[in-house]
Image: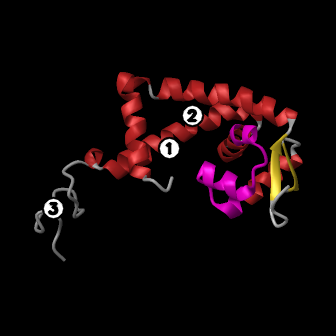
Amino acid sequence: MPDAEENGLENGLDSEFASAEDSTGLMLWRVTNAWQAAQRAALRPFDLTHVQFVLLASLAWLDTDGPTTQRELSRHAGTDPMMTSQVLRTLERKDLVERSGHPTDARAKSLRVTAAGAELARQANAAVEGVDQRFFTPLGAERAVFTGMLRVVLGPAS
């Protein structure tokens, strides 16, 4: 079997990139892993996983507009509906979220953040935003541009 040099490959992988660090996907993977590790560490004192925080904070954000359904929460947070349901059960057991009958849709449940959940979301959000501030500091004034580019990648369905 011919080796990488015989195929004209310097690194043994048929790739458009001369260096792995030039791969947008690999860099996104590495940045995401580093960012998630920092977020997990910041959320540990609050006894929240990152997905629990995202759903709790998203619900607190949406809760100001009236009843929120699981589907609306899932869409807002960008989470899988089945996983959202499982995490909501955990948040409900922790007395951070309440579910009740929806006022206009008999098939749906209305979700609300409890007072304890709202306070925890507020405190955890400060920690999460602090991590973001420190993590994205190297972007400087380009941070807003970077965020806008991420929205472009996600597209209009996000």
Residue beneath label 3, please? Answer: 9
Read off the magenta span.
Answer: 61-84
Quick one: SS at disc 1?
A: helix
Q: Position of residue 118 (x, y in %)?
A: 79, 33
Residue depicted at 66% across the width and 55% down the height: 74
Residue beneath label 2, please? Answer: 38
The amino acid sitting under disc 3 is Leu
At label 2, counting other C-alpha atoms closer than 10 Å, the crowd grade (few under 14, some 14-19, many 20 or more) is some
CA–CA distance in space, label 2 to label 3: 36 Å
Q: Is residue 76 left or right of residue 144?
A: right
At label 3, counting other C-alpha atoms closer than 10 Å, the crowd grade (few under 14, some 14-19, many 20 or more) is few
Q: Are marks 2 and 1 in contact (CB under 8 Å)?
A: no
The answer to whether 106 is drawn above or below residue 94 in the figure is below
Residue beneath label 1, please? Answer: 33
The quadrant of the image that shows the N terminus is bottom left
Residue depicted at 23% across the width and 48% down the height: 19
Residue depicted at 76% across the width and 58% down the height: 86
Mark 3 vs mark 1, foreground winner is 1
Q: Residue 141: which disc?
A: none
